[in-house]
Image: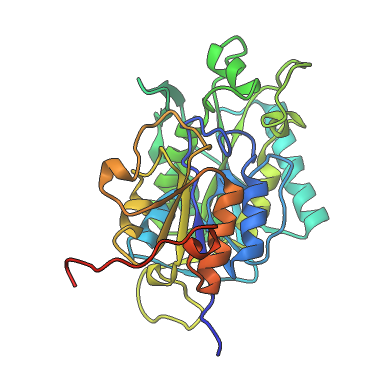
Amino acid sequence: MSQRPYTVMLIVPTGIGAAIGGYAGDALPVARAIAQVADTLITHPNVLNGAHLYWPLTNTYYVEGYGLDQVAAGRWGLRPVHQNRVGLVLDQAIEPELKLRHLQAADAARATLGLDLTDYVVTDAGLGVELQTASSGAAWGTIQNPDSLLRAVERLITHGQADAIAVVARFPDNLGGKALQQYRQGQGVDPLAGAEAVISHLVVRTFQLPCAHAPALSPLPLDSTLSPRSAAEELGYTFLPSVLAGLSQAPQFVTQAPAQASDLWAEQIDAVVIPATACGGGAVMSLSQTGARIIAVADNKTTMQVSADALGMNALQVNSYLEAIGVLVTHRAGISSAALHPTLPSLNRGNAI
């Protein structure tokens, strides 16, 4: 007897200092492992992006966070593609030498990986990225000229026939900042992540196309005590390669009929894996109302304190991603995980039955 494909969503929310996945693509090993268990894995750019480092996962959907929320809520579906034509937006505020470094990275992706890129567009005004930190320690941010970004994206879609959008915005340099130093030591919150999410959310919400962001920054001085979890971002002058690779085959959003047989919708998601203290996001809240199995991972600590229990959400808490993968294996096989424990209590008579 054949079973329907098994689909898992992996979420590590951005900018909340997740112990795994809060740094430079350091949740990618988790994604690679879950992709061996699932027929389809749905996850988001900051899980898969490691600056110059990435990994091709043929059964994995690269979905921006706002789009992920819309899919989980059942408003949008996902349609797989063979190849996207990626449009590149560069912030006018990027200095000439740093701009050239990013263009060389884009050309390298074309020549070495065979990616299809449109001609690039420079925004008609500097985007004016500002970074902020919430009282919880979570990172967020704003852009002063969002209309300039949207005009640039519209040009790429209308004149360049872009199917997906990569944005490179100039971010503030803060070489002596405490948050940055903690991040480089693998101890703090990514100070860029919240503002990055604002940029990509705006594009996806407005145009319903795949989008991801790579910040433009001056190179940092060498640090011999750098954490391995942060090291991927210090291999070069740009974070763009993993963004372009991910967008090249990111699924398109389905926002209206007609549907196709290959489209994936919320009711097909079998399980969602999330840090145990970060269960309050839109995607998890939506999937908690479906038949999806929610697996909360305790040792992926974050700055948040929003547990499944606090929300009255039915979730299975596990200690680690290794344990979560074991739960996924049993769930996919149709085996009660209780049967794998050395003791199995007898059935009780239910009062409500």
Q: Is residue 80 visible?
A: yes
Above or below, comparing residue 53 to residue 174 in the picture: below
Instruction: Please name whichever residue, 291 or 201, is drawn nearer the observer in this view of the structure.
Output: 291
Instruction: Please name whichever residue, 171 or 127, is drawn nearer the observer in this view of the structure.
Output: 171
Give the residue drawn at x 48%, y 38%: 14
Give the residue drawn at x 54%, y 53%: 324
Q: Is residue 118 visible?
A: no
236 sits left or right of 162 in the view: right
- From the top left corner, tell me how far across and down residue 34 is, in percent: 61, 58
Q: Quadrant of the N terminus?
A: bottom right
Give the residue drawn at x 67%, y 22%: 218
Give the residue drawn at x 35%, y 73%: 256
Give the mark count. 0
Instruction: Please name whichever residue, 203 or 330, is drawn nearer the observer in this view of the structure.
Output: 330
- From the top left corner, tell me how far across and down residue 128 is, in percent: 46, 26
- From the top left corner, tell me how far across and down residue 284 is, in percent: 37, 52
Q: Which residue occupies the extreme right position in the image? A: 112
Q: Quadrant of the C terminus?
A: bottom left
